[in-house]
Amino acid sequence: MNHDNPAAIPPQPSAPHFIRAIIEEDIRTGKWQGRVETRFPPEPNGYLHIGHAKSICLNFGLARDYGGACHLRFDDTNPEKEERQYVESIIESVQWLGFDWGRHLYHASDYFDRLYEFAERLIDQGDAYVDSLTAEEIRAYRGTLTEPGKDSPYRTRSPAENLDLFRRMKAGEFADGTHVLRARIDMGSPNINLRDPVLYRIRRAHHHRTGGNWCIYPMYDYTHCISDALETITHSLCTLEFEDHRPLYDWILDRLKGAVPCHPQQIEFARLNLTYTVMSKRKLMALVDGGYVEGWDDPRMPTLAGLRRRGYTPTAIRLFADRIGVSKADSWIDAGILEDCLREDLNTHAPRRIAVLEPLKLILDNYPEQGEETCLVPNHPQKPEWGKRAIPLTRELYIEADDFKETPPKGYFRLSPGAEVRLRYAYIVRCTDVVKDAEGNIVQIHCTYDPDTRSGTPGAEKRKVKGNIHWLSAKHARPAEVRLYDRLFLNAHPDAGGRDHLAFLNPGSSRTIAAYVEPALAQAQPEDRFQFERHGYFIADRVSTTPGGPVFNRAVSLRDSWGKTPGSP
């Protein structure tokens, strides 16, 4: 039932793209002596989302395909926002996707001593200086995209003075914000990232790995390139927003030539933009902290933990990453492509089961009151080797409320007064009466069944009816909590143009109903997946399911709109 074991999934051939072309040319020319070493470097300040999955599949997939290695490295240089729980969730998500870093698990904090030594080297070379401007003054001196910046008055400090101040920064002599270490590059550069960027800042904060050992912390741009070099990464893959940072990446490593083992190549690709969601960890955190969702693993969230709880499989996400491809051009991917990848996977691997989500009582008046028989139902219509299971049939049944219309519209082939349908896997029945409560709501329908039309018996198919509905025995059906999820946002681009994404939240994105399921589902285990016939694909919730008490989340509806339940997208 559980389709999360990557070892059982044969690797799929990946589509060609420009990064593969670069790697293959490097292999042909012997640039890295045939090595391919990549890395996935998340910051542990939140949970990974579907955008990270694209990078994970790319980095680990390329290393796998070319016989190399991919490192998992935590960029833990901002202790105020980082927590151990995020580290653990990232490790779990990458493993769940089916990737293994082997011995290559690293943290930027592993290199704090080396990073400090390299900073002193830059100071000695005259390539870095301690600046005493305030943060506001640094921003003002930096200039704009159309106007050059201007030199800090502290830019001319001597290497000896800078080294003394930097060491005193490390020793904790100064308050937060008093000084920073900046690279001495070019305040007039058209690339604003080269206008003497900050390399170190003072920050008295407890680090989840190093505790209180440090009160100065390196910036990402400084740390990232050196970490790549120390780990002898060959191809440093990142998203397009870092393209303008590449000159700084190269500048730092050029200044440290001979002190670091290599100079990796940074290559940028387009990030994933998925409709009906947001990809900013800051905005996702706002959803969590504001109570708009139940947590990072809420099944409506685009986090990998949320998608997993929703019912997505590693195979579906890897298929999605391969299907959308890798390019240099920014574009939007329709959320329907991700949903189709899940349908494609689960259509093959999910057993079929019966659930009645909005039950209406149906009574077979001419069936014996204590009568009971079993109907054999295939576990998967395309997989006869999966066998069949027995479903009990009794006089009183549950059917879907929308399978009956007192006044049917044109083209309605399900049950209505005087009409006939087949109870799937059982008999043809005719509606003879409708029972309503005091408010006029339909609470029961009465039918008669034709005993000569049982499915699977000789001659049963001689009588043809157009309607075919599913059902459960009221005596044997088990109550179950079912959660119907829709997209979290009503707008396809909820944060486009700086809009407030919270203004587009879908108030109907989650609905919990009391449903009935067939007896076999009562023993469903956490993360067991099924197709509920006509309703879509569901998963036993990994958090709320208890022994004998499954809670089912709808992962995705069926393509067939006829089978959609209320709340379907």
Image: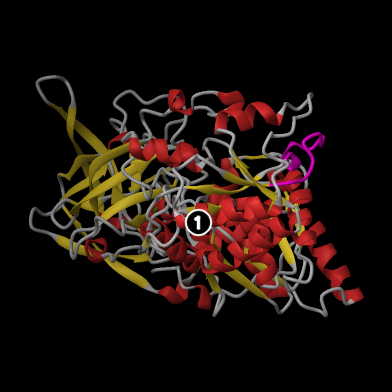
Residue 440 x %, y %: 16, 20
Question: Which of 158 and 43 lies nearest the eye of the viewer?
Answer: 158
Residue 221 located within the stretch drawn in magenta = no
Left or right: residue 407 compared with residue 464: left
Q: Within 10 Å of the Cα at label 1, are there few (<14), some (14-19), or many (20+) other Cα atoms?
A: some
Please give left or right for residue 219 compared with residue 155 in the image.
Answer: left
Q: Can residue 359 be seen in this view?
A: yes
Judged left or right of residue 409, residue 107 is right
Name the spot of residue 102 as percent of width and height, x first. 55, 79
In this view, the residue in front, 515 or 339, is: 339
**Coordinates of residue 38 in the picture (x, y in percent):** 68, 68
Say whether residue 177 is left or right of residue 122.
Answer: left
Q: Is mark 1 on a helix, strand or loop?
A: helix
Q: Which residue is drawn at 76% across and 71% down?
A: 262
Q: In this view, does 244 lie above or below 32?
A: above
Residue 188 lies in the magenta stretch: yes
Identify which amino acid the numbered label 1 is placed on. Lys
What residue does disc 1 label?
Answer: 170
Taking depth in this image into account, of 456 and 512 the one nearest to the observer is: 512
Q: Which span is picked out in magenta?
A: 183-195
Residue 348 in sight:
no
Magenta segment's dominant SS is: loop
Q: Residue at x 31, y 43 (%)?
A: 294
